[in-house]
Image: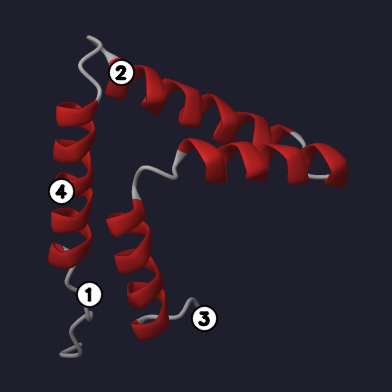
Amino acid sequence: MTKSLHLPDLRNLSEALATDLHELAKSHIAIGFILTLREKIDKQIDQLDDCQHNWKKKTKIKRNIKMLSSPFHRFQKELHEYRQKFPIS
């Protein structure tokens, strides 16, 4: 088989996330803020997996994830552009 897989370039996503993390580190001097934020987002994602049949709880958790991830505006913009270029089949 000679057909190669197409791997999308993730450089822009990585750079946007790095820039957002750098800005967060400068604006939130509390030790461990970024780690705490990551743990909170992870917890919400785990809960989202557990409540697939409860649409009320699912909506609330999605709202929480959106609020917790709001500092990552550059990353979200790049992710939107990435999804437009490489839609999920």
What secondary structure is marked by label 3? loop
Marker disc for residue 87 = none
Q: Amino acid at mark 3?
A: Ser
Distance from Cα at disc 2 to Cα at disc 4: 16 Å
CB under 8 Å between discs 2 and 4: no
Q: Earlier in the sequence, mark 3 or mark 2?
A: 2
Q: Earlier in the sequence, mark 1 or mark 2?
A: 1
What secondary structure is marked by label 2? helix
Marker disc for residue 89 = 3
Q: Nearer the viewer, mark 1 or mark 2?
A: 2
Q: Nearer the viewer, mark 3 or mark 2?
A: 2
Q: Earlier in the sequence, mark 1 or mark 4?
A: 1
Residue 31 appears at what percent x and percent y? Answer: 22, 9
Q: Amino acid at mark 1?
A: Pro
**Side (left or right) of 25 relative to 73:** left
Q: Amino acid at mark 4?
A: Thr
For label 2, the residue is: 33
Disc 4: CA contacts within 10 A as few (<14), some (14-19) or many (>=20): some
Q: Earlier in the sequence, mark 1 or mark 3?
A: 1
Marker disc for residue 19 = 4
Q: Nearer the viewer, mark 3 or mark 4?
A: 4
- Quadrant of the rendered image containing residue 13: bottom left
Disc 3: CA contacts within 10 A as few (<14), some (14-19) or many (>=20): few
